Amino acid sequence: MSLPSMTLFNNPASPFGRKVLVMLHETGQQNRVTLHPVTLTPTAPDAALNCANPLGKLPALQLADGSVIHDSRVILDYLDQQHVGNPLIPAIGAARWRRLTLASTADGIMDAAVLMRYERGLRPVEKQWDDWFNAQADKIHRALAALEQDAIAELASHFDIAAISLACALGYLDLRLPQFDWRTPNAQLSAWYAEVSKRPSMQATRPA
Ligand code: BEZ
């Protein structure tokens, strides 16, 4: 077995980092990566991560030649070109744009959920802004309703970049916003998520 050749700056709670971990598992590349755990908040950055990624954002992947790639979309694209199995990002055509757009919707859910988490968990109570918090929640509800209505069959058809991204977004909602009831209005997504959560890649990357 060869030694890991890449280093992944990550935090186990990050849904964006989890996408990378799931991708590694799904494509049989998990042994190629050493994990570099990072603990950070927007107001308490990490010096080593800032050197790797001047934006100070997770995840970032240092390659064997020392270069660093980010963000999670770029890393997934890179990893998808490093294995010999079926691609998890369609290379061309309408399928590519559709799957990437579904993945982008899932990333937007993660963005909103992380902002909600920081707003309630980090911002001083007297500075918290309920309208802003509720607008993030509305964004998530709208995105999930659209996926429930239009994308269930596509998501169920294969576990690719779109499905990986959404599974990680829903996992993050459960982890950090457990009071956010996304299941009741989205029964099909709920059933889909229950199924994909059983995948070894999802089990192995479940945040504690
Ligand atoms: C979290 O703890 O919720 C978190 C950590 C890193 C990135 C995003 C979210």
Image (cartoon, rainbow, N blue to C red):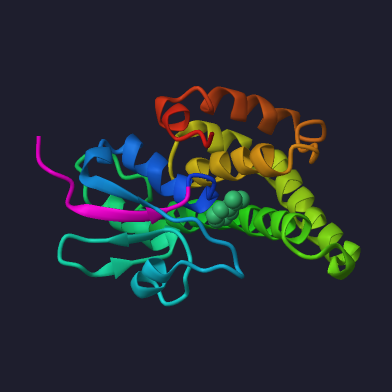
Q: Give percent across and percent down for residue 139.
A: 76, 57
Give left or right: position of 164 versus 34.
Answer: right
Q: Residue at x 41, y 73 (%)?
A: 50
Give left or right: position of 145 versus 56.
Answer: right
**First to last magenta residue range:** 1-11
Q: Give percent across and percent down for residue 20.
A: 40, 48
Q: Is residue 129 magenta?
A: no
Q: Is residue 106 visible?
A: no
Q: Residue furthest bottom?
A: 54
Of 201 and 103, the residue lying toward us = 201
Give left or right: position of 136 versus 167.
Answer: right
Of 128 and 168, the residue lying toward us = 128
* Total numbered badges shown on the rendered structure: 0
Q: Give percent across and percent down for residue 89.
A: 38, 50
Q: Is residue 122 visible?
A: yes
Q: Is residue 8 magenta?
A: yes
Quadrant assignment for the C terminus: top right
Of 159 and 182, the residue lying toward us = 182
Give left or right: position of 90 versus 120.
Answer: left
Q: Residue furthest left?
A: 1
Q: Quadrant of residue 170?
A: top right
Q: Residue at x 9, y 34 (%)?
A: 1
Q: Residue at x 76, y 32 (%)?
A: 183
